[in-house]
Each structure stands twice: as C-alpha cells, then as structure tokens.
Image: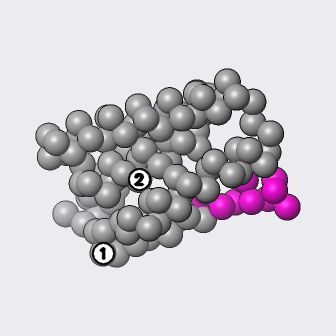
C-alpha cells in the first residue's frame, strides 16, 4: 500500500494542480502545501536513506529560490513558483532534468493555448 501511495499520490495531486491552473489560472495554496507535506511521511514510510532525503530537500529549496527569482522578474506567477518548489521535493538528482524539460514544454503549450 505504501508503495502504491508513493507512486500515485504525487501524480494525482499534480494533475489536479495542472487542471485547476489551466481552468482558472490559479493554484490553491492548500494543494501546493499538500504536495509538499505528503513527501515527508512517504519518504519516511518507504525507508528513504537520509542522504537521498537530503538531496530531495536541497532540490526543493533550490527550486524555491529559482521560482522566487522567476516570480520577482515577472516570468512566473506566485502559484507556479510555490508548486515548482513543492514538486521539487519529490525528485532526486536523476529525475530533475526530465521534470524541468517536461514542465517547460507543458508550460509552453499551455501558454500557446491560453494566449
């Protein structure tokens, strides 16, 4: 059951966030907070080693800083910056680059459809 939650909860929450953002151009704070908070008990429940846990947190903090900078320059919305940081917690070093590439492409497609 823990394995199922660890591989399904994040994608479900991100789909809800993406759909809500596409429909209303808003990402609720409760959803971003849920994505961030759920990482911690699932990391503990799956027995994630402390060093790996540390890299996940470091990636989340780095994404928060990047998102804040992009927000301050008017490139990102505040909800996008917070969601990027929350999602960053879930990715280890091997998955960060593919996540960012897919995020950029999905954001570009969304921008073309909305604009």
- Extent of the magenta region: 1-11
Of callouts 1 and 2, the N-terminal one:
1
- In this view, the residue in front, 103 or 90, is 90
Question: Residue 102 — which label?
Answer: none
Q: Position of residue 29 (x, y in %)?
A: 38, 65
Determine if the magenta segment contains residue 3. yes
| C-alpha separation, residue under disc 1 versus residue under disc 2 | 15 Å
Q: Position of residue 112 (x, y in %)?
A: 26, 58
Q: Quick check: 56 above or below 78?
A: above
Q: Is residue 49 left or right of residue 67?
A: right
- Name which residue lies at 58% across and 34% down: 56
Give the quarter of the image for residue 92. Answer: top right
Q: Position of residue 28 (x, y in %)?
A: 38, 69
Question: Residue 24 — which label?
Answer: 1
- Name which residue lies at 60% across and 65% down: 12
- In the picture as drawn, the residue positioned furthest to the bottom comes out as 23
Check the picture and name the quadrant holding the C terminus.
Answer: bottom left
């Amino acid at each position: 059951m823990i394995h199922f939650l660890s591989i399904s909860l994040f994608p479900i929450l991100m789909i809800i966030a993406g759909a809500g953002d596409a429909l209303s151009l808003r990402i609720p704070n409760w959803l971003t907070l849920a994505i961030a908070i759920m990482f911690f008990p699932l990391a503990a429940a799956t027995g994630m080693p402390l060093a790996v846990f540390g890299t996940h947190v470091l990636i989340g903090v780095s994404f928060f800083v990047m998102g804040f900078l992009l927000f301050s320059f008017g490139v990102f919305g505040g909800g996008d910056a917070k969601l990027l940081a929350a999602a960053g917690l879930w990715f280890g070093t091997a998955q960060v680059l593919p996540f960012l590439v897919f995020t950029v492409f999905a954001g570009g497609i969304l921008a073309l459809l909305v604009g």
